Amino acid sequence: MQMVICSGSTKKQATTTLASMKMKINKDIEEFSIQELFQNDQYKVPLYQRNYAWGEEECIQLVQDVCDYAKNGGRNNYYIGTLVTFPREEGGKIYYEVIDGQQRLTTLAILLCVLKNNSQFRTDLSWFKKINISFEKREKSDKTLKKIYETSEGMLTPDKSLNENIWSVYKYFKSNLSKECAGRDLCEKDFFEYLLKKVIILRVGVPQQTNLNKYFEVMNSRGEQLEQHEIIKALLMSNLKTDNERKFFSQIWDVCSDMDKYIQLGFPKKIRAVIFKAEIEYQEKSFEQFLAEIEQVSRQKNSSSADIFPISAEKCEEINLLTLLENDSECSERIEETTSEKEEREIFPSLITFPNFLLHVLKIMCEDRKEELPFGDSEERSEIPLDDKRLVQTFSTVLNKNDKYLFTKDFAANLLKLRFLFDKYLIKRDNSRSRNFRDTETEIWTLKQLKKIEKISPDGKKSDCFTYVNTFGATQDTKERDSEPENKKLILLLSMFHVSYPSQIYKNWMYAALRFVYQNPTVTAKEYEKYLWNLARAFLIDRYLTPKNLDEMTYANLRQSFDEIISKNNGNCVGKISGIYWEGINIRDDTPHWHRSPNEDVWDIWWGVNNVEFQRGENVENFVFNFFDFLLWKNSPDKNKDFSFSHRNSVEHFFPQQDPIKPKAMPWRFLHSFGNLALVSRSLNSKLSNDLPTMKADFLSPKKNLDGFKKCSLKLRSMVDIANKGDWTEHEIEQEEKKAKQLLETELAKEMP
């Protein structure tokens, strides 16, 4: 049996066996399923605990963890972490003071409220009689939890008396639970069953004589854990045979791990000149060839290898997990960082972390070697998961199928190559032009490569330095601002994918893009653009515009997994326009030849209204909205030249789900129509609330609020323009739906954007 421990609000996860835990279960440590935890006992969060602080990122992580283990190990328990408590008595009744774990506990309570209040989930929560969590002297938090528990299926109206974080997390779960399950090809019913019965939390009781102030101080001063990628580094280095092999591997690893810095800048000049042509362009060579040339350079300059790899052989030979823990990876070169390099780290932050990047490299490498590896819950599954919680497990599985010495050298070479390609062909956020580094509503993206230029100082001395230019385009002007059309279009395509899938473990599009440039390292802008366009078409036609149940539509296209789209179909669309299932994105289709299955499972997914089955509007995938925005931009690039994709993750009903004047006046079919929906940021969603369309349009009018208007998606801008010119009724919604269908049909038929 395997125990998986979730470390709460941190991203670090540890996977270990029960035997290695050396933990004795006694009377002070009890196991509870999520249902048992919220069915019994009472918990109180004391005043000395911080306020509820979890946001979207932590909630995404929690849901994805449960989805992952429900999908791949549904028969085993998933140990989500610990809840440290201290028993107290009040009014003759026992309650448990929460010492550690209140963030996770509160989040799980919010999640259960969402399941209880949404009949679309079809979950039996009759046992969930009350909220069994309270907050000491925090009336706003108490009120919010009770209100989201008691609310009906309709929208809960936010106000200043509610805890904003609890309210935001409730809305996130309500809008995204179905999407997260669909993204993993996991049935919602299986997810909820696993969550309630198989997700286990350990309640740890603190002995009565414990000094709680001292205990809490210790709990908040715990040290850093060993990162999984550090374990992988030690495992791989142990397979190498010579000092210089280990030194070179260590240097490659350490340079590549700095994801916010262009790879060329991480190497000393002598090594950079060997790996990169003119110190810029990667040269296709093996690990052995690179190392031989570096050693030759060392000999030609009458220097030892220590001049190239300034680490002692003894330290490198002794590399193991212990030295990693104690010495912070001493088997690596220490390169002093300049002020400009530190600034660059803030200017061009990476889209993913190094552990996640390692999995992309491993997956591409294994596919290139045509290796069949068993991942998941059956021997037939061979896809390597992009889930860094299973980094050690995944690498160990691959290593056990290979010659470890040869594999380690090949992996180092592929790591180098793909980091170079990642920097050159994948977008980065450009913080040099963002007014606020943390502002996710006005994000600016860039697609640049490194360029070496000659710099002349005031006294006439010449020196080499590096700058950034567009990856694609005719000019080499170092001051150009992504204005060249081909670079601009690629930036929009890549950022469209990125913001649609904010979670790193779902960045299948990034795997597809890296796989493509790995196979085509000198790709042209047109070739890259065509590939990304067809990948987007495949995501729409072969996945999101197909029925979730294969027997639901007789003539519909078959639903493809992301791995089938990318690896089997090479990013090409295999479905037909005539086979599109429009109601999958809430667009009515009057085609007479559809035949629906009477299978009851169909009605678990779709909502029958006037013979037209629509799902709740917020369940339409973000990618569909972002792709539609790209089409609007593509057809009017001059009009929309100020537009860029940002993390708009909330689905807004332009006509609200609760009409403040005429309750339930808008029929379901129009309320949840694609014509009435748009993506907005979380902050804008809160501001718009349940206002009528004319009030929303007035608030976002470019004449009154140009900055707010520019932050809107192009679809929402169009809706605002229409409402400002007249009204927003069932007629306008239907017309927008028809126009959307026509535009999608026309553009999806094209093989070039």
Image: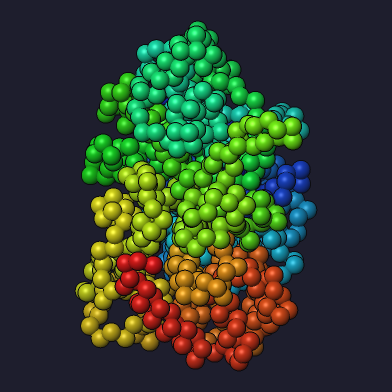
Quadrant housing the N terminus: top left
Q: Nearer the viewer, residue 418 or 739?
A: 418
Number of numbered discs on residues:
0
- Left or right of 27 in this view: 145: right
Q: Nearer the viewer, residue 749 or 583?
A: 749
599 vs 403: above or below: below
Q: Residue at x 25, y 52 (%)?
A: 568
Q: Residue at x 52, y 71 (%)?
A: 637
Q: Residue furthest front?
A: 460
Whole-percent x, y for residue 587 in the image: 40, 79
Q: Residue at x 53, y 42 (%)?
A: 450
590 vs 708: above or below: below
- Left or right of 444 in this view: 512: left
367 vs 509: above or below: above
Q: Quadrant of residue 188?
A: bottom left
313 vs 604: above or below: above
Whole-percent x, y for residue 423 in the image: 49, 43
Whole-percent x, y for residue 508 in the image: 40, 51
Q: Nearer the viewer, residue 423 or 410?
A: 423
Asked if one can make out residue 739 in the rendered structure from this viewpoint, the answer is: yes
Q: Residue at x 39, y 12 (%)?
A: 242
Asked if one can make out residue 94 in the rendered structure from this viewpoint, the answer is: no
Q: Quadrant of residue 663?
A: bottom right
Q: Which color scheme does this rendered protein use?
A: rainbow
Whole-percent x, y for residue 105 in the image: 59, 48
Q: Nearer the viewer, residue 251 or 138?
A: 251
